[in-house]
């Protein structure tokens, strides 16, 4: 399956503690470059988030935006410190008995005692935050994958159409190539015969054949054509695979371009030169599309 590197996914999750909105945007890049913008209190989850994204997206400049709204909650607890209060009460009663005092011990008195009432502040644990972030992250990843998949299919179809165009043009060149040597042979023979007639000399067929053989070897493009066909077949196989293929395709396009340039430099035929321009145009369009394939 071919995936584009361009995509967008949004995930949301709400519970009794948080409202989380998470967005992932990606564009083409040679590597997997993940940039996360989120509240500082979530920085502890940066590696978790990156690892989860890398498990699904292998290439691209990936921007992640996380918004966390924390709902109000009672973040403190008040308890009586009975160990301390018991000691205070015992001391009061001992003093009361010793000196014959009649004052009673009141609630107001006890609650004013230092350390008699404990106030402890509560903090939410890391896992409570993660349990709210993870569902939104999974949803965003799922949606961006679907978008990248759809665009990847469009890129694949476009590349295959260009491959077919190249194959058709190559067939024309393949049929046109043998005529180059025949035309050269006829033209060479006519020119030599014309010169020899003025000198009353005879044509050396063996030498002429050698010259034509040398020319035929210099202008032979059969090897290049065979290699281009092979590269086109490999592109088709790679596009049918289920792994990231962008780098492989980029290499093959470079090889295609090199072979086509060689054909252009070897062939003196104007028609083939024009066909080479068409080939290079199709290859360039493939190259542009490949830049966005994962």
Image (tube, rainbow, N blue to C red):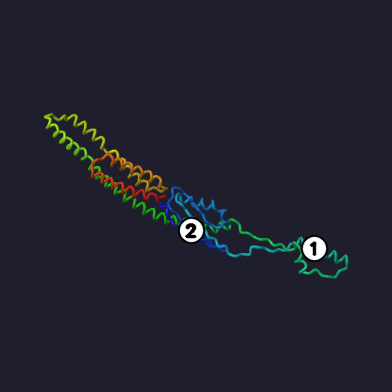
Q: Residue placed at 31% from the left, 46% from the top?
A: 280
In the depicted structure, whether residue 162 falls above or below residue 79: above
Percent coordinates x, y for residue 88 in the rendering: 80, 63
Question: Is residue 207 shown above or below 74?
Answer: above
Q: Which residue is mark 1?
A: 88
Q: Looking at the picture, how far across and down is residue 154, in whole percent?
A: 36, 54
Classify 148 as above or below 88: above
The circle on residue 221 is none
Q: Is residue 1 visible?
A: no
Q: Secondary structure at mark 2?
A: strand
Which of the marked residues, 1 or 2, is nearer the chain's N terminus?
A: 2
Q: Which residue sits at x=21%, y=32%?
A: 211
| Residue 75, quarter of the rendered image | bottom right
| Horizontal relation, residue 286 to residue 129: left or right | left
Q: Residue furthest front?
A: 198
Choose top left, top right, bottom left or bottom right for residue 111.
Answer: bottom right
Decide if residue 165 is in sight here: yes
Image coordinates of residue 242 in percent, x first then y, are 41, 48
Assign a secondary structure to mark 1.
Answer: helix
Q: Which residue is mark 2?
A: 23
Spot occupied by residue 176 in the image (x, y as percentages of width and height)? 22, 43
> Dot 2 surroundings within 10 Å: few (below 14), some, or many (20 or more)?
many
Q: Is residue 95 left or right of residue 177?
A: right
Which residue is found at the position 68% from the left and 61% from the top?
A: 120
């Amino acid at each position: 399956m071919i995936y584009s590197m361009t995509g967008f996914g949004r995930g949301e999750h709400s519970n009794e503690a948080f409202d989380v909105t998470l967005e992932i945007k990606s564009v083409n890049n040679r590597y997997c470059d993940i940039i996360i913008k989120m509240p500082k209190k979530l920085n502890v989850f940066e590696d978790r988030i990156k690892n989860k994204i890398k498990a699904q997206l292998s290439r691209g400049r990936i921007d992640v935006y996380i918004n966390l709204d924390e709902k109000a909650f009672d973040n403190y607890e008040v308890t009586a410190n009975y160990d301390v209060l018991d000691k205070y009460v015992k001391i009061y009663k001992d003093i009361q008995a010793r000196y014959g005092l009649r004052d009673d011990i009141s609630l107001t008195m006890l609650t004013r005692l230092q350390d008699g009432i404990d106030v402890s502040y509560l903090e939410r644990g890391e896992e409570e935050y993660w349990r709210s972030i993870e569902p939104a992250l999974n949803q965003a990843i799922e949606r961006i994958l679907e978008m990248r998949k759809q665009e990847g299919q469009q890129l694949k179809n476009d590349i295959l159409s260009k491959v077919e165009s190249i194959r058709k043009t190559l067939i024309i060149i393949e049929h046109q190539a043998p005529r180059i040597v025949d035309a050269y042979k006829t033209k060479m023979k006519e020119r030599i015969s014309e010169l020899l007639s003025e000198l009353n000399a005879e044509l050396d067929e063996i030498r002429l054949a050698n010259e034509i053989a040398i020319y035929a070897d210099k202008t032979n493009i059969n090897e290049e054509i065979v290699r281009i066909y092979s590269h086109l077949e490999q592109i088709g196989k790679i596009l049918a695979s289920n792994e990231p293929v962008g780098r492989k395709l980029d290499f093959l396009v470079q090889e295609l371009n090199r072979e086509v340039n060689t054909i252009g430099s070897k062939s003196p035929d104007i028609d083939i030169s024009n066909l080479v321009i068409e080939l290079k145009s199709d290859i360039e369009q493939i190259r542009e599309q490949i830049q966005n394939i994962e």
